[in-house]
Amino acid sequence: MKRYHKKVYFPDNSKIKLKKFTDNVNLKKWQYTSHSLDNLKYRAYNIKDILLFIRGLQLDYNNIFEYYVNDKGEILKAVYRINYKNNFALCLVISENKSLVTLYVNSLDDNHITLNEKLYCKG
């Protein structure tokens, strides 16, 4: 599986692929992995509010900062950074079947200085 990050490198055709991925995901019903629900228990102060917020989301491909592809170049999952509230952002890892794989909460001013560029493909 290949991994791409916006701050490292997105191939030229990424915009088209990410838009198509997001359009397809937006047509589906949310699913939640046990991992994502467990993560919510430990990382969120109000699980119900976050789940209601996520359920009402219309995802935008412009919010994707990381994605993963298989050997055929098909996107398997993408990570969306969504402004939430109280100066926080939700980072949602979503699979092609609209399953919330995991999520984490960041401060809106987080600049992710710990980014390990070695993990990602480069152009």
Image: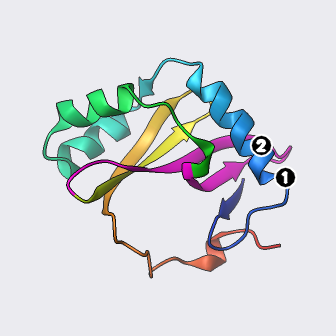
Q: Where does residue 116 sit, x and y in percent of width and height?
A: 55, 78
**Label 2 element class:** helix
- Which quarter of the rendering shows the C terminus? bottom right
Q: Which residue is tagged 2?
A: 17
From the viewer's perspective, is 17 left or right of 37? right
**Label 1 element class:** loop
- Number of on-image labels: 2
Tell me where residue 27 sits by quadrant: top right
Q: Amino acid at mark 2?
A: Lys
Residue neighbourhood size for the residue with mark 2, other residues' Cα within 10 Å, grouped as few (<14), some (14–19), many (≥20): some
- Which label sits on residue 54? none
Q: Do the CB atoms of the residues marked 1 and 2 lie less than 8 Å apart?
A: yes
Q: Where does residue 92 sit, x and y in percent of width and height?
A: 44, 45
* In the foreground, 32 or 64: 64
Q: Which residues are magenta?
A: 63-86
Residue neighbourhood size for the residue with mark 1, other residues' Cα within 10 Å, grouped as few (<14), some (14–19), many (≥20): few
Tell me where residue 2 sits by quadrant: bottom right
| Residue pictured at 28% horizontal, 57% vertical | 88
- Check residue 79 for magenta coloring: yes
Tell me where residue 18 sits by quadrant: top right
Q: Amino acid at mark 1?
A: Asn
Q: Which residue is tagged 1?
A: 13
